[in-house]
Amino acid sequence: MKIALIGLCVLCAATAVGQTGGGVLSNQVTVFQIPDHPQHAEPHAMATEHSIVGGGAQTYTSEHGERPLWEFGPVSVEPSLGDVARAYRKEKLTAKKAEIVFEKQGS
């Protein structure tokens, strides 16, 4: 209980010091001035062009056109959800059952 009371006192003292902000603000009015920047944007020459891929023009090639779908390999067809459910039900009926069934378990 004493530790809680000491902790509460320290917390209250810390918040009281925090509210003062460490110093007192003056009541005098101050005018806020935005700094002036005399330089303005001017047109100038652009930088020289360079490749973002690296190397020269021979390191990057681009082709146009379309490839036929048969070049991408066989298309796999997923079974429907109904077929999966029927197969699961059939597998459940043919599964091995327990030979001994205990009626009462526990103590």
Image (cartoon, rainbow, N blue to C red):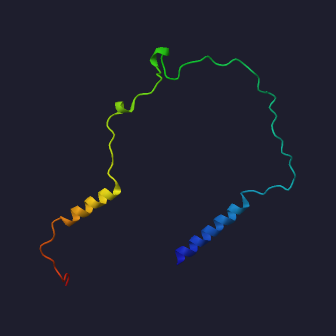
**Which residue sits at x=30%, y=57%?**
84
**Which residue sits at x=23%, y=62%?**
90
Q: Is residue 24 found left or right of 104 in the rendered image?
A: right
**Location of residue 70 with respect to 7 vertically, above or below:** above
Of residues 35 and 27, the one nearer the viewer is 35
Quarter holding the C terminus is bottom left
**Residue 64 location in percent, x, y?**
48, 23
**Which residue sits at x=64%, y=18%?**
47
**Residue 26 location in percent, x, y?**
83, 55
- Would residue 56 be visible to someone looking at this image? no
**Residue 40 location in percent, x, y?**
79, 27
**Location of residue 52 with respect to 5 vertically, above or below:** above
**Residue 55 location in percent, x, y?**
48, 17
Of residues 96 and 86, the one nearer the viewer is 86
Q: Is residue 75 found left or right of 19 in the rendered image?
A: left
Q: Quadrant of residue 68?
A: top left
**Location of residue 102 with respect to 17 vertically, above or below:** below
Of residues 104 and 52, the one nearer the viewer is 104
- Would residue 51 be visible to someone looking at this image? yes
